[in-house]
Image (cartoon, helix red, strand yellow):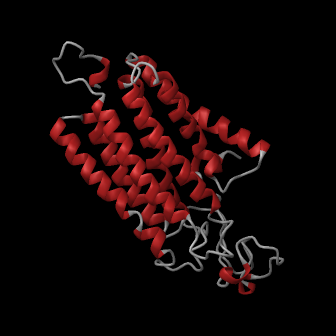
Amino acid sequence: RFAPLLTGHHWAPAYGPVNRQCGRRAAPPPVNRKGYCSMEPQEGTPETSGLTTQVDNYCERLDASFWAEPVNAITNLPYLLVAIWMGARALRAGDGGAQLLAVLLGAIAIGSFLFHTVAERWAGLADVLPILLFILVYVFFACRRFLALPLWAAALGMFAVLPWSIAVGAAVNTTIGSINGSEAYLGTLFLFFIFAAILARRDPETTRGVLIGAGLLTLSLTARSLDQTVCGVFPLGTHFLWHLLNSAMFAVMIPILMARRTPPGSPASGAAQI
């Protein structure tokens, strides 16, 4: 029952060739696959279980072909560009933590591209697992560098992210219902604000950066949440904005973490080095 909260995806295994006319999950009653509007598996469609099951989560996708989501697929390129940029900066700075985040961001780019082209469940996992790992690793280093917590406390904070995200997502589902799977990421957004509140007095510069990142994530989550809603009036959907805005957010948040790293051998060296 918690799978959508963990992955941010709601698996929908059938396609509708005229979704642009009737709208995703629109008012007309679902009919068979040739009737175009149903998001439920129909007679003759693939099985609804297994890692190779094809899925249809986005306005732009109207069939099962590789390039059925060209804009959603191509807008993963900024992820890769930011990953290369951040990786080069981290390498020059000798910042192993930022290098790891850059590698994970590159994996996000590849996984998301696969999901928006192959569109099968295994590709969905290739999309969301690097995102989860990035969040966990970032929280660990944020606890070390922003809050100067000891290793054990930073690790505890990292492992608390998953149950925290599940709890927040479940609370949202219970109160207002699903927001197109975006509830899975609200826990991360709230963590941004928690870090900003803790740092507000001791480090205003970092606080400003974290709040800028939170603002970008808020906008990207809004775009992600609206994708299915706007299909009838904007057939391209808004999911591509999730990619573009998140790329900008990564370009803000990784340098903030790098700036808080204490150079090895300095008098203040310690937790902030890692």
Q: Residue furthest bottom?
A: 34
Q: Quadrant of residue 34?
A: bottom right
Q: Identify the residue at horizontal 46%, vertical 72% (top origin).
A: 71
Measuring from the top left, give residue 196's x and y in whole percent.
49, 29
Measuring from the top left, give residue 202's x and y in whole percent.
41, 18
Q: Is residue 122 left or right of residue 44?
A: left
Q: Is residue 258 visible?
A: yes
> Height in image: 231 above or below 76?
below
Q: Is residue 61 left or right of residue 102?
A: right
Q: Quadrant of residue 258?
A: top left
Q: Is residue 9 visible?
A: no
Measuring from the top left, give residue 161's x and y in whole percent.
54, 33
Measuring from the top left, give residue 206's x and y in whole percent.
38, 30
Is 237 or 116 nearer to us in this picture? 237
Q: Is residue 159 left or right of residue 170?
A: left
What quarter of the picture does the C terminus occupy? top left
